[in-house]
Amino acid sequence: MLVSVLAGFASGALAPLIRKYFSVQVTGLILAIIPASIFIYLSSLAGTALSGTPVIEKVNWVPALGINFEFYLDGLSLMMSMLISGIGTLIFLYSSSYLAKYEDTGKFFAYLSMFMAAMLGVVLSSNLMTLFIFWELTSLTSFLLIGFKHKYEKSRYSALQALLVTGTGGIAFLAGILILYSITGTYSIPELAGFKDVIARDELAIPAVILILLGAFTKSAQFPFHFWLPNAMEAPTPVSAYLHSATMVKAGIFLMARLNPYLSANFVWSEVITYTGLVTMIFAALISLKQNDLKKILAYTTVSVLGILTFLIGLNSDYSLKTLGVFLLAHSLYKAALFLTSGSVDYATGSRDPFKLGGLLKKMPATGTAALISAVSMIGILPAFGFIAKEMFYTSVTFNNLFMTTGFLTAVILTYAALMAGVKPFLGKFQSPKETSETPVLMWIGPGVLATLSLLFGLFPEIFAGGLIRDNYKALSGLSTSYILKLWHGVNFELILSLITILCGIGLYLLRNKIFNMKIPDIKFIKPSFYYDVLFNGVLTVSKLQTKFLQNGSLRYYFVIIILFSLGLPAFVFFTGEGYKNVYLGEIPGIYEIVLGIIVLISVIVAVSAKSRFLVIAILGVIGYMISLLYILLGAPDLAMTQFAVETLTVVLFVLVIYKLPKFLTISAVKHRIRDSLIAISSGVFITLLMISVYSVEMKSEMKEYFGDNSYILANGRNIVNVILVDFRALDTLGEITVLGIAAAGVFGLMKVLKKDSK
Amino acid sequence: MILLLSILAGILVSAGIFLILRRSLVKIILGFALLTHAANLIIFTSGKITPGKAAFIKKGSESLSEPFADPVPQALILTAIVISFGITAFALVLFKKAYKATGSDDIDDYNTTDSIKHNI
């Protein structure tokens, strides 16, 4: 299983290379081999996986942290992974034809392969950490896929939105996993079975559950995070078909289904899921009424169906969990087909507006038939697989009036949407912006296969899906069942309700023009996407302000920030802390020292206020010499000598370099000079106070003693400072010489350039 | 003595900071030179101040006993003086080059590349 996951990444890396040597079609066909063989491999494991003992594979990755590749193939992951690889194969075939006129198709196939691999990783992992990594990889690759037409701003916006929404959810998910780990001490999902009691009682379990659900809800576009999904329709149609029917958005459903047997022990889990699903299903269905784009209609109904699936997990009843598998399977089949046929319609006619399309069946018989069958399944008419799904859904909700009404209304609108997206363009009077003909065979084979499956699954549910659904139920509930899938349950309440649904749906369809033209006030602030934009722009504004504030490009400003920060922080501690108790001011300085100090003070005042450059340079020399003298008086003759020599050189250098410059200018405004003097004086005062308080504490230096004792004995030198420099710390001095050497080389080089300039 | 040195360092810090906040590039370089002095004095004070007692081992004895000046800060300052000289020298020449290229001593003129007169 590890190999099949990694194969997708490998083929993704090779895709651009293959595309270089072959046409788009051949590339697509070659790459379709990977998902096809994964599909065959998984089918070969199906027998074992469904026999009741899941297929388990473990490859250690970071065993010390409990993070490993643990793959787990049971009914749930088998169904998901077969959908991913199976539909994936068809998508590759479809894309190879659909994308003929696109640029950068090598990249496209690379993203698609990697996305598929990441998705397989998600559904096969039974280690929460590796699951999370694959989860994030699907966010990243779907970002690349949605933004594939990156020349359009709308495309980039949608891709970023999808990434940010699902990425934020991903972070919440990670936090949830970590909290769960802190409670249970394991990342392995099957091992959670032993911790159900802890999860039910531990007070940390509630935040963990909510955070994990945030991850699942953002990924599966649940209200109020649903808005990214319809926007993601900017992607090329095969991507929409793949991401939004069987894979990406079902990852959240998968996660909830996978964790349901363990986390449903906590009361928050089912409650939150049920009502989120309920709101999402009706809310998204209502929005789909106002769309006039085939893909948008399908997108909103997808959100609605995701709401239904979420809701079914939340009900957590015997029957709803059985329904989940059937509904998920049925939806993946018909929705992928409808997305693909809408792409084909767009390809053939150049329009996706169902109001402007009609009667295409004659021109596009294969695509049309596939779309019609899929629409029949979506509406839930005998004998398509969708019929069973809807009957079971109704059976699951009849116990509660609120649930039943909402479910009924949603189903009515879904019927309407199916008529709009799958029936309207193909039946009735011929309507099309331009002459059309059937699409290439590769583009109708995918929907054709899916539509056929919708029919076959409906006609022979037990043969095709019975085992899968039973094992799926086992994965979701932890219990075995001998439930038999049947197409016909006889005339019962659900069937009658279903008939009414279809009639109401047709009614809505007949009123379609009125509904579409109905004026609904556009209230911005009830849309969650409005808050996304506000938040997004808010972050940008804040970061701009912050950059403007901290990095405004003026050197002085940086200095001010650095000085205030590096002195302000210690000053805060200094003045709010204990302060200084036993101030020790040292011996009373002698008359020479005091005189030197006064000279420095006067020099400094002159240096700051002088207008003449030469005066300032001379003053700089004076300050340097005074400090040299101070060093002599305080027992540091080496320092004095060095300072003296360096000061002389510096003054000479200054004079040489800047004697030709204009007068010193007082450019700054008075306001700035006052501000700067305040900063400067308070810094100086603080440094003085800090020094006094620090040096009032007696400090004992062991190094001093060591050097005093050993300089002569070990290094044969009587001048200890020199001995330190050339012997004990000789390497430091070598470094110092290197620095000087580099500076000298720099000066030399610049001087040469200067000389050349003046010639 | 600590008081005197602390006040001196404070004065030098004030002057240094005031100068590096000016727009004239020469003043900024001068400000750095003053800050260097201040930093050296701060390090110097960290050793015990012993006027007139240099860290020399007298002829005839093999080791030195208290009181004597702490040689460690002195060694550090020695390095610092030399390095700061290197920095000042390099900064000056760099400044000269910048002045020749832009014809300005005002760092606010350096914010854009439009005012450059010659090629660098």
Image (cartoon, grey):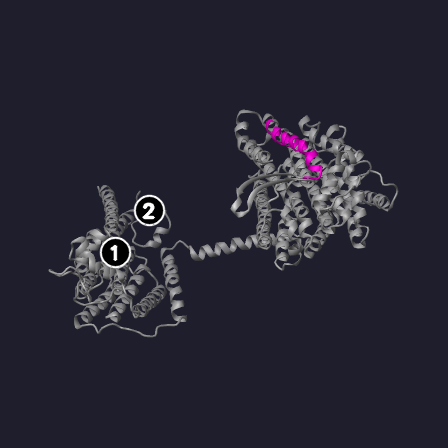
Q: Is residue A570 above or below residue A554?
A: below
Instruction: Write down the region rendered in magenta.
Output: A30-53
Q: Is residue A89 above or below residue A379?
A: above
Mark identifier at residue A730: none
Mark 1: which secondary structure? Answer: helix
Measuring from the top left, give residue A281's x and y in whole percent.
Answer: 73, 49
> Which residue occupies the foreground of this view, A344 or A229?
A229
- Looking at the rendered image, the quarter that the N terminus of chain A falls into is top right
Measuring from the top left, give residue A752's x and y in whole percent.
Answer: 23, 42
- Looking at the rendered image, the quarter that the C terminus of chain A falls into is top left
- Give the residue type at disc 1: Ala
Mark 2 and mark 1: Cα distance apart in space: 35 Å
Q: Is residue A513 above or below residue A536?
A: above
Extreme right residue here?
Answer: A491
* Image quarter of residue A621: bottom left
Q: Earlier in the sequence, mark 2 or mark 1?
A: 1
Can residue A745 be spotted in the picture?
yes
> Which residue occupies the foreground of this view, A354 or A21?
A21
> Which residue is identified by label 1?
B80
- Are there few (<14), some (14-19), or many (20+) residues within 10 Å of tag 1? some
Q: Is residue B90 left or right of residue A322?
A: left
> Which residue occupies the foreground of this view, A79 or B63?
B63
Measuring from the top left, give residue A45's x and y in whole percent.
Answer: 67, 33
- Give the residue type at disc 2: Ile
Tell me the chain of label 1. B
Extreme left residue here?
Answer: B60
Q: Is residue A615 left or right of residue A496?
A: left
Q: Residue shown at 27%/69% (left/top)? A: B7
> Which residue is identified by label 2?
B116
Q: Residue shown at 67%/31% (left/top)? A: A44
Q: Is residue A694 left or right of residue A728?
A: right
- Do tag 2 and tag 1 residues touch (Cβ < 8 Å)? no
